[in-house]
Image (spheres, rainbow, N blue to C red):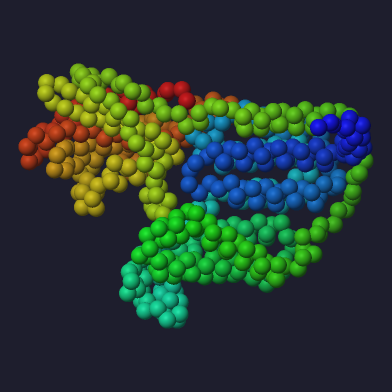
């Protein structure tokens, strides 16, 4: 196959003819900068495995930001070198941060893109020009707000599970099925299903409300009737499609393969797509199509060519951000490396065995039991015939309130363990319990401070030991996280050996805990 070089040269000439005029305008460079930042941020979100951080949501909001910029690309902006240098400084402070710190520092994961957007905004529009782009920055802030608390409102305050169960049973009864509801349970002669919050339309309502916020900011201005129509459409669409899903799950509850498919994330995604398409049709009816055309009047339009110095400045900035994006996309660095070694020496104990624990992720269907454990290790020790087993689980983005070890216990044993919380002065809190074979001691080893067993104690340590002035400068320079939300869940156990009362065994476990707590805590200092 021969390549016609003449056609290639002709294509190059036509390409240059098309792009050369674009190089003369400032908006071309700014659009490239914003688009590259969007790609960089989406890459960071895509590698962030904490439940609730979805790339689709961020991509939609970035499309809205780029759309608003495109609408106002010819607006005249008065920029100064001071604004440009300030913006460049903020941009560099964000871009120099290693990728793994983005995921260890939830605070910076939220405010980092806002700082970056402010920096690029100052660089692009100057101090005076920011007020003309308030909707663009409002979208950026809304995109990064932790809106997950809306799920708690829908779950606890509105009792959405019970309401969904009642409506779903009514729908089935109306269609001729013998269905009744009792609380959050839908009963049929062929079986019954318990309606949890994540099985309802709560997540669909939450998703559609986020799209509604995007529309309310991008499509401006709107009448109050249109705003109410959009909000009610989002709530109604999500709720009714959630009820339809629960009704279908109740019908196929005995078909395990079908039930598993439609109850899983894949089946839920199909219903989310149906809800989104339905809501899009309602939006097209509520909002006329001409609402997507540029609606802001531009008092002054600047189509003059950009100054050479300004062009060089923007080109260099774009190139730097482009290189940072390519490096982030192509890097092979292991973002979530384990800090648990294969060997840990304990004072006066001989290590006889070690093994890697299988990591079990939390079930997204239960919003009250979410945790993210990335590594686990088990260590066995012996001293004078006494055996002690130490199990460590390394968790990121913890709140210190969901102990993965306790989640595997029976409800009765969980309640008993919660009543047996003790404190060792200078070392913190722990929970002790026994089963038919062993005595156990378990707690969360904090990066700084004493051990904890609940979120109140854990967050008190974060505010007391992490949020200090001495850690502010390293955080700004991208050397450390500001609030370290990691946790090493530890469980020490020793055999009962026929003893009915484990008091003496708890003393042994406490002694091991006191002698080696600082050793385990020092594992947080390991380089990622």
Image quadrant containing the N terminus:
top right
> Is 251 situated left or right of 31 in this image?
left
Q: Determine the residue positioned at 56% across, 27% down.
A: 332
Question: In the image as oriented, which residue stretches furthest toward the front?
Answer: 1
Which x, y percent locates residue 228? 63, 69
Place residue 463 in its image quadrant: top left
Which x, y percent locates residue 94? 63, 32
Q: Is residue 327 above or below residue 416?
A: above
Q: Is residue 229 above or below residue 60?
A: below
Q: In this orientation, which residue lies closer to the viewer: 512 or 7?
A: 7
> Is 27 situated left or right of 481 in this image?
right
Q: Determine the residue positioned at 45% across, 77% down.
A: 171
Q: Determine the residue positioned at 61% across, 66% down.
A: 278
| Residue 231 can be seen, yes or no | no
Place residue 446 in its image quadrant: top left
Which x, y percent locates residue 496? 11, 36
| Residue 4 can be seen, yes or no | yes
Which x, y percent locates residue 212? 63, 61
Q: Determine the residue positioned at 40% across, 70% down.
A: 251
Q: Is residue 86 above or below residue 230?
A: above
Q: In this orientation, which residue lies closer to the viewer: 400 or 435?
A: 435
Q: In this orientation, which residue lies closer to the viewer: 419 or 192?
A: 192
């Amino acid at each position: 196959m021969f390549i016609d070089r003449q056609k290639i040269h002709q294509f190059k000439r036509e390409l240059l003819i098309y792009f050369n005029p674009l190089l003369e305008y400032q908006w071309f460079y700014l659009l490239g900068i914003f688009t590259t930042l969007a790609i960089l941020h989406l890459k960071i979100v895509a590698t962030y495995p904490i439940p609730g951080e979805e790339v689709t949501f961020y991509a939609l909001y970035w499309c809205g930001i780029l759309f608003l910029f495109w609408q106002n690309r010819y607006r005249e902006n008065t920029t100064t070198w001071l604004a440009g240098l300030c913006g460049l400084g903020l941009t560099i402070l964000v871009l120099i941060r290693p990728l793994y710190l983005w995921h260890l520092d939830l605070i910076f994961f939220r405010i980092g893109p806002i700082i970056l957007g402010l920096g690029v905004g100052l660089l692009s529009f100057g101090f005076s020009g920011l007020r003309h782009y308030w909707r663009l920055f409002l979208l950026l802030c809304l995109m990064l707000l932790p809106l997950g608390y809306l799920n708690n409102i829908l779950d606890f305050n509105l009792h959405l599970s019970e309401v969904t169960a009642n409506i779903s049973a009514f729908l089935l009864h109306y269609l001729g099925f013998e269905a009744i509801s009792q609380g959050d349970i839908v009963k049929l002669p062929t079986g019954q299903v318990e309606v949890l919050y994540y099985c309802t339309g709560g997540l669909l309502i939450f998703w559609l409300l986020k799209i509604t916020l995007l529309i309310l900011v991008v499509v401006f201005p709107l009448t109050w009737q249109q705003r109410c129509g959009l909000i009610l459409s989002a709530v109604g669409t999500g709720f009714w499609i959630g009820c339809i899903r629960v009704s279908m799950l109740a019908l196929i509850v005995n078909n395990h393969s079908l039930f598993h498919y439609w109850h899983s994330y894949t089946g839920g995604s199909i219903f989310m797509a149906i809800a989104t398409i339905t809501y899009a049709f309602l939006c097209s009816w509520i909002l006329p199509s001409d609402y997507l055309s540029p609606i802001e009047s531009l008092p002054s339009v600047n189509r003059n060519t950009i100054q050479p110095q300004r062009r060089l400045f923007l080109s260099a900035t774009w190139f730097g951000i482009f290189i940072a994006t390519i490096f982030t996309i192509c890097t092979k660095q292991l973002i979530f490396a384990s800090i648990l070694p294969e060997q840990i020496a304990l004072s006066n104990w001989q290590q006889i065995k070690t093994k890697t624990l299988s990591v079990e992720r939390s079930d997204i269907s239960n919003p009250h039991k979410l945790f993210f454990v990335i590594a686990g290790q088990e260590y066995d020790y012996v001293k004078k015939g006494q055996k002690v087993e130490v199990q460590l689980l390394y968790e990121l983005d913890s709140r210190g309130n969901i102990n993965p070890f306790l989640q595997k216990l029976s409800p009765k044993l969980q309640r008993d363990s919660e009543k047996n919380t003790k404190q060792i002065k200078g070392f913190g809190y722990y929970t002790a319990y026994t089963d038919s074979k062993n005595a156990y001691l378990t707690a969360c080893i904090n990066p700084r401070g004493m051990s904890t067993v609940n979120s109140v104690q854990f967050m008190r340590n974060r505010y007391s030991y992490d949020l200090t002035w001495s850690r502010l400068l390293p955080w700004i320079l991208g050397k450390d996280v500001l609030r370290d939300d990691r946790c090493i869940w530890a469980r020490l156990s020793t055999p009962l050996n026929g003893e009915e009362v484990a008091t003496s065994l708890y003393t042994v476990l406490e002694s091991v805990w006191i002698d080696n707590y600082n050793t385990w805590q020092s594992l947080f200092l390991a380089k990622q």
